[in-house]
Image (cartoon, rainbow, N blue to C red):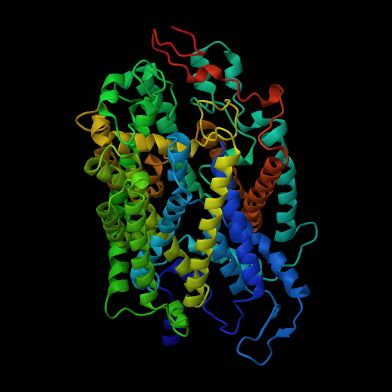
Amino acid sequence: MEDAEDNNCPIKQVDMTVPKTDDPSMPILTFRMWFLGIVSCVALSFVNQFFWYRTEPLSVSSIPVQIAVVPIGHLMAKTLPTRLFFKDTRFQFTLNPGPFNIKEHVLITIFANSGAGTVYATHILTAVKLLYKRPLPFLPAFLVMLTTQVLGFGWAGLFRKFLVEPGEMWWPSNLVQVSLFRALHEKEVRAKGSTTRTQFFILILISGFAYCLLPSYLFTTLTSISWVCYLGSKSILVQQIGSGMRGLGIGSFALDWTAISSYLGTPLASPWFATANVLAGFLLVMYVMTPITYWLNYYGAKNFPLFSSKLFKGNGTVYDISTIVDSKFHLDRDAYSNNGPVHLSTFFAMTYGLGFATLSATVVHVLLFHGKDMLKQSKRAFGGNKKMDIHTRLMQKYKSVPMWWFHIILVLNIALIIFACQYYNTSLQLPWWGVILACVISVIFTLPIGIITATTNQTPGLNVITEYIIGYIYPERPVANMCFKVYGYISLTQAITFLQDFKLGHYMKIPPRIMFMAQVVGTLIAVIVYTVTAWWLMGSIPNLCDTSVLPPDSPWTCPMDNVFYDASVIWGLLGPRRIFGNLGEYGNVNWFFLGGAIAPVLVWLAHKALPSQGWIRLINMPVLLGATAMMPPATAVNYTSWIIVAFLSGFVAYRYKPEWWKRYNYVLSGGLDAGTSFMSILLFLVLGSTTLQWWGNKGESCPLATCPTAKGIVVPGCPVL
């Protein structure tokens, strides 16, 4: 009984999912691991950076790689020679040490994780070079990209003892990865009339590859089918209601996997309760708050488009930001006074308010619904007499990563950041004390946000707070604001990612030093590929990201970068006082902070009053209020299509076809990601930026959706009311 108790985990889900055994004799640092890991890292880094600038930016996760490398690994185990090189020396090795094993697979996935997602600092390069049209040398750009990704290692090292080793810090999202690893390495026999996971993956990959030719080249209207617009070809109101790209998107949908998964990630991985919260939030914002604020003309809403992330003058024309930037890349106050204040579309202002509400709602929600559990788990985790769980005991046989490794990385990285910001101050603008302040904010929040993520799977972001702080302290310097946000916010996010990967290695019994090596090497390779790919695209695609010059149907409109650029104008060039403070007209938006704090309290009170109604507890106000956080740049059609597919997967298939869902759901997602990305890259390499001219490639045909509806506003291409 005592042995059984020692083998139990403090978290039931971990106890049921993670294997409690280890085989230290498994070869890990094999040729297969290095080859497949580096190729995966390079491929994902290139693909994700390539899609970064597209109108529908597909973000390819590590799951397709996690699935695809299994048959390749087994094939290499069967075909590679087993000959020993440098036999009987300390350098003895073989290309084929035996069967492809699960620990090699985990390290390959860690390499792939380094290339999954994006490097947030790329926004700075794009904003400065392409949108502000200011010079930015390659070296400072690369240093910003590198240091933002590596700084998180320092924070991760400081807190890994508290956030990785204790069993109470269980990192729920890792259990999905663990389950998938186990499923892919279990013996699978093909049942009669069915397919194995590998066969199904290949079929979906080929099908997705072939189908992607339609929405990407032959019939691009499939990206947003807004049939309501055809009911009123001359009506602004009808097109505002029906446009999936520039309006409310009622009735619009997409038959393009890129459009479906581009901003919210794959809908096939969303549990139904989370999808329901996103649906409720989307309906509330898009079909209640937006129509009310627009048609009641809050903040002069009718002078501007219903849905837009651009910045405007009071007369409805797009604000030419270059006219208010002086030769030193600061705000030209006289020019700004002559041109008049910057105005936001009411929807854009409201999205900032929802960002404020989400931040306060996250803190209150976690305290109310998870506070006791977090306190209990934290006391057990940080207590002096804490008992090690089975996984930590199994990891004791491996050498830990020395603390001084992290200290060296941290000190060198901070020194490099300060050097870059001082030496290239004309380009980066951030003073040395700004670097120190960003690091202080990041290190203060890493532990509490790490505890929240490790126990609740929610990660509050610091982007709004960092923008606010530096915007008040050091206004009128847009690049300084961007750099401060990246160092204060993304270094924490990177630390959380590294800690999560450390915990995955902890569960899968990967020696810590080998895990550390894979993370460092993977990160360095990814940064190089991301930077070179971005630089190549900036130089090879004419007018990249410049929506004032590009045609409306261009695939290179960079929606995320344009929103980041507009944020740098709002928070950096102008400063929060001129927008949300005493010098601006949007001060009432700050009340969203209070509203966000109150919302979880109402849900908590309802739950306490009606404990038998279990569905009340599933109302997650941070998710609900933050549902439309990606809008803009995401549009209504991205949400409507994502919600439909997520409902079919997370509710219909999960409830009525559970065996099919368990066997094929994640494989389907990986195959669609891989097939779509391969075809899109092939089309770009073969055809470049050329498009096929015919009716099916003219977009959603809702040109009037961007028109203002106030009387007397003159905008090219729009009727004057």
Q: Give the residue displayed 65% in from the left and 23% down from the top.
A: 698
Answer above or below: position of 104 versus 491. Answer: below
Answer left or right for 576 relative to 653: left
Spot the residue most to the right.
192
Q: Which of 237 and 106 lies nearest the eye of the viewer?
A: 106
Q: Is residue 101 visible?
A: yes
Quarter that holds the C terminus: top left
Where does residue 280 sit, x and y in percent of width and height?
43, 37
Quarter that holds the N terminus: bottom left
Answer above or below: position of 51 versus 174. Answer: above
Spot the residue most to the left.
582
Q: Quadrant of residue 69?
A: bottom right
Where does residue 632 sit, x and y in percent of width and height?
45, 34
Answer above or below: position of 600 versus 196. Answer: above
Q: Which of 593 and 57 lies nearest the eye of the viewer?
A: 57
Where does residue 391 sit, x and y in percent of width and height?
46, 77
Where does residue 32 sit, x and y in percent of width and height?
66, 71
Q: Give the residue displayed 32% in from the left and 72% down from the top.
A: 381
Q: Is residue 171 visible?
A: no
Q: Which of 563 and 535 lies nearest the eye of the viewer?
A: 535
Q: Quadrant of residue 252?
A: top right
Q: Give the residue displayed 59% in from the left and 55% down from the top.
A: 44
